[in-house]
Amino acid sequence: MEVSKAVSVVFFVFFAQTGFGQVETRQLYGRIMRQSSSIEGVNIVNNNSQIAAVSNIEGDFSIAVKEGDVFVFSAVNLNPVKKRITQNDMVSSQLFIVEMTTKEVELQEVVVNENANITAENLGIIPKGQKKYTQAERQLATAGDFKPIMLLGLLGGSMQLDPLINKINGRTKRLKANVEIEKREKNLLQLGYLFDETYFIQKLNITKDNVNEFKLYAIENDEFCTLMNSKNKTSTEFLLGELAVKYKEIKASENK
């Protein structure tokens, strides 16, 4: 009888410890917000279990949690946030709201040249305010553009022959194309400098395979290029978002 009681006590203690040792797990439903707007593409990682999730287009997510778990919420353009799951979070029936803020990048002042104020204009070598040309633009200016009225000068022997010759062989046309290509290359480099590939994929929902095509689509918009080169990043980002919507509509219609 004593042995039976002892065995019963051992089993009771074992099952009691097992029961108390188990921690309740539940599926947590939440939403990522930034200034009252939902955010897509935020990475959610459970530091304890290493389970991960990503917020959808509505900013919503769901993930398995236990009380005491620590979560890290992060995105390329947002300040990371850490949250610990409390007992109230485990029993609450409301959405788990996470507020995030935009990451501000402060650019340090860089002195490229201490004598930057010494220019050809200041030294009187060239007039102040004179337009500066790129190599392609200088080549085009040298080639000249043919106008029919120049034929009158040919009769008097005063007409320059270069524009006429260039009209015949199409060199001026090619030089004009070079200027346009140069501008596009410059705008493409500027766009890549302002926004990395991750921004196009996560923020604008452009597929990785279409990022370069979308960049070319964006720089064809004169208004966008003007804004981008004015260094107004906020307005540039806003217009880029509108162009992304139009681009995706075009791609969707192509796939029908």
Image: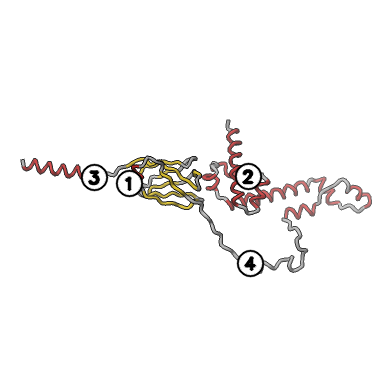
- The answer to which of marks 2 and 3 sits earlier in the sequence is 3
Return the mark for residue 87: 1
Give the distance between the C-alpha atoms of the residues marked 2 and 3, in whole angstroms.
60 Å
- The answer to which of marks 3 and 4 sits earlier in the sequence is 3
Give the distance between the C-alpha atoms of the residues marked 3 and 1, in whole angstroms.
16 Å
- The answer to which of marks 3 and 1 sits earlier in the sequence is 3
Q: Which residue is mark 4?
A: 113
- Judging from the image, the colouring scheme is secondary structure
Q: Is residue 116 left or right of residue 147?
A: left
Amino acid tagged 1: Gln
- The answer to which of marks 4 and 2 sits earlier in the sequence is 4
Q: Nearer the viewer, mark 3 or mark 1?
A: 1
Q: Secondary structure at mark 1?
A: helix
Q: Which residue is mark 3?
A: 20
Q: Which residue is mark 2?
A: 218
Specify the quadrant of the image occupied by residue 216. top right
Q: Could you classify mark 3 by the number of other residues whose Cα lies within 10 Å: few (under 14), some (14-19), or many (20 or more)?
A: few
Dots 3, 1 in contact, CB < 8 A: no
Q: Could you classify mark 1 by the number of other residues whose Cα lies within 10 Å: few (under 14), some (14-19), or many (20 or more)?
A: few
Q: Could you classify mark 2 by the number of other residues whose Cα lies within 10 Å: few (under 14), some (14-19), or many (20 or more)?
A: many
Give the distance between the C-alpha atoms of the residues marked 1 and 2, in whole angstroms.
49 Å
Q: Nearer the viewer, mark 1 or mark 2?
A: 1
At x 55%, y 43%, the residue is: 204
